[in-house]
């Protein structure tokens, strides 16, 4: 039973009481006042920092207020304005009803999904082209309806959809793109070490190429040669780097000889090299900010352990199946009690595997 209907029934009962001629009017008022006081005592006895009125409480008190003279409304814990407001709200509920929408009915969800699919698959198709194509399939939809569907789904007109977006281009070319950068690590003795790394955009595979205290142009170019000899650039066609002076012409020449085109990011635009920046943040959160490095040898060992964990064990949300770049074979369903923990980097990172493995 809705609140409005309950209120109307209660009001009718109160009116019946008022119409009974054998009851004195004053007796009815006193009985109503007693009911009000009893209800308010019940509200005060509730265990809460402040008395809270439920919907039923408001209905009862608002209905009884119509029996008690307004001059005696001091019996209520709330003000007269509150009682009148409750009454207005209940009256408003009485007159609420479901409004019937006017105008054309909304297009079938399946047809709308098909229009969106055609618009996304064909960036040069306009409203007329999609409408005509639907007519060939036996679906009659006006140009205006196609337009409204595309606007509702955030799809711009055809001239503004020419060519893939930047995200679509990166997604289609990610397999052939790599990014490189540096990040610094402060040792326990406040010595600054520079780490040079390369990350493959498509697979998220990372390679920590070297650690040094003086990353000059010659050292950086030598790291590029080392990576080339290891075959790290065989599938790479584009390498994203910033405009740091450590990346000299010798560095670019090494990559050019490997058939790799160097793409420089705009000045002071770290987001243009977002994949490298994301890796730096991940390393700091998972390792760098959770331990002290005693020196270069210690850092090289940590980077080697983390590189293996990152490439072979750590799930990656950027990949379709959320698996590591070089994942181990999938295990059959095992008993959860037969899973053991493997500590990596002295327990800073944990891996899990079947106990029998």
Image: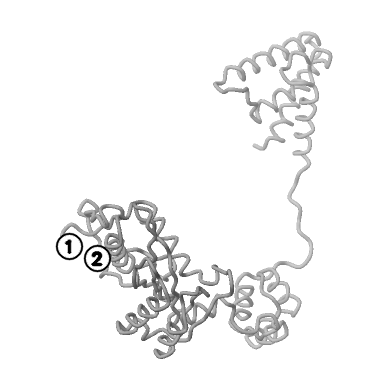
Residue at the (73%, 72%) spot, across then down: 148
Residue 241 position within the rendered picture, expressed as x and y whole percent measured from the top left:
49, 76
Is the residue 185 above or below the residue 164 in the image? above
Residue 128 percent location from the top left of the image: 73, 85
- Give coordinates of residue 45: x percent, y percent: 57, 17
Q: Residue at x 54, y 68 (%)?
A: 270
Picture quadrant where residue 295 is located: bottom left
**Which residue is nearer to you in this view: 33 or 23?**
33
Residue that appears at 73% across and 76% down? 147
| First of labels 2, 1 by sequence position | 2
Residue for badge 2: 331
Horizontal relation, residue 262 to residue 41: left or right: left
Q: Which mark is residue 300?
A: none
Q: Is residue 63 above or below residue 129?
A: above
Cβ atoms under marks 2 and 1 closer than 8 Å: yes
Count of labels shown?
2
Would you call the spot at circle 1 few (<14 residues within 10 Å), some (14-19), or many (20 or more)?
A: few
Q: Distance between the Cα atoms at labels 2 and 1?
A: 10 Å
Q: Residue at label 1?
A: 357
Residue at figure coordinates x 43%, y 80% from the top left = 175
Left or right, 10 with reference to 80: left
Mark 2 element type: loop
Looking at the figure, which quarter contains the N terminus? top right
Q: How would you rate the neighbour count of disc 2 (Cα within 10 Å): few for under 14, some for 14-19, many for 20 or more?
A: few
């Amino acid at each position: 039973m809705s609140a409005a209907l309950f209120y109307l029934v209660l009001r009718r009962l109160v009116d019946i009481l008022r119409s009974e001629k054998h009851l004195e009017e004053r007796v009815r008022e006193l009985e109503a006042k007693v009911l009000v006081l009893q209800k308010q005592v019940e509200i005060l006895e509730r265990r809460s920092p402040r008395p809270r009125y439920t919907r039923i409480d408001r209905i009862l008190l608002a209905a009884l207020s119509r029996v008690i003279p307004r001059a005696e409304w001091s019996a209520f814990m709330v003000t007269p304005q509150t009682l009148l407001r409750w009454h207005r709200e209940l009256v408003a509920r009485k007159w609420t009803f479901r409004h019937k929408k006017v105008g054309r009915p909304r297009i079938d969800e399946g047809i709308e999904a098909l229009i969106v699919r055609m618009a996304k698959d064909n960036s040069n198709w306009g409203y007329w082209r999609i409408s005509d194509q639907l007519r060939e399939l036996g679906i009659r939809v006006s140009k205006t309806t196609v337009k409204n569907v595309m606007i509702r789904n955030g799809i711009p007109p055809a001239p503004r959809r020419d060519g893939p977006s930047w995200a679509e281009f990166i997604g289609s070319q990610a397999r052939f793109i790599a990014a490189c950068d540096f990040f610094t690590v402060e040792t326990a003795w406040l010595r600054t070490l520079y780490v040079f790394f390369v990350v493959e955009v498509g697979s998220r595979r990372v390679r920590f190429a070297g650690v040094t205290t003086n990353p000059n142009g010659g050292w950086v170019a030598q790291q590029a040669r080392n990576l080339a000899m290891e075959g790290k650039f065989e599938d790479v066609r584009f390498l994203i780097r910033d405009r740091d002076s450590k990346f000299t012409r010798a560095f670019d020449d090494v990559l050019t000889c490997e058939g790799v085109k160097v793409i420089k990011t705009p000045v002071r635009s770290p987001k243009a090299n977002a994949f490298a920046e994301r890796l730096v943040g991940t390393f700091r959160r998972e390792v760098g900010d959770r331990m002290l490095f005693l020196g270069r040898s210690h850092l090289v060992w940590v980077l080697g352990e983390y590189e293996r964990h990152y490439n072979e064990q750590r799930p990656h949300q950027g990949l379709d199946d959320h698996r590591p770049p070089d994942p181990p074979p999938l295990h059959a369903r095992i008993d959860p009690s037969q899973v053991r923990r493997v500590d990596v980097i002295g327990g800073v990172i944990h891996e899990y595997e079947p106990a029998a493995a």
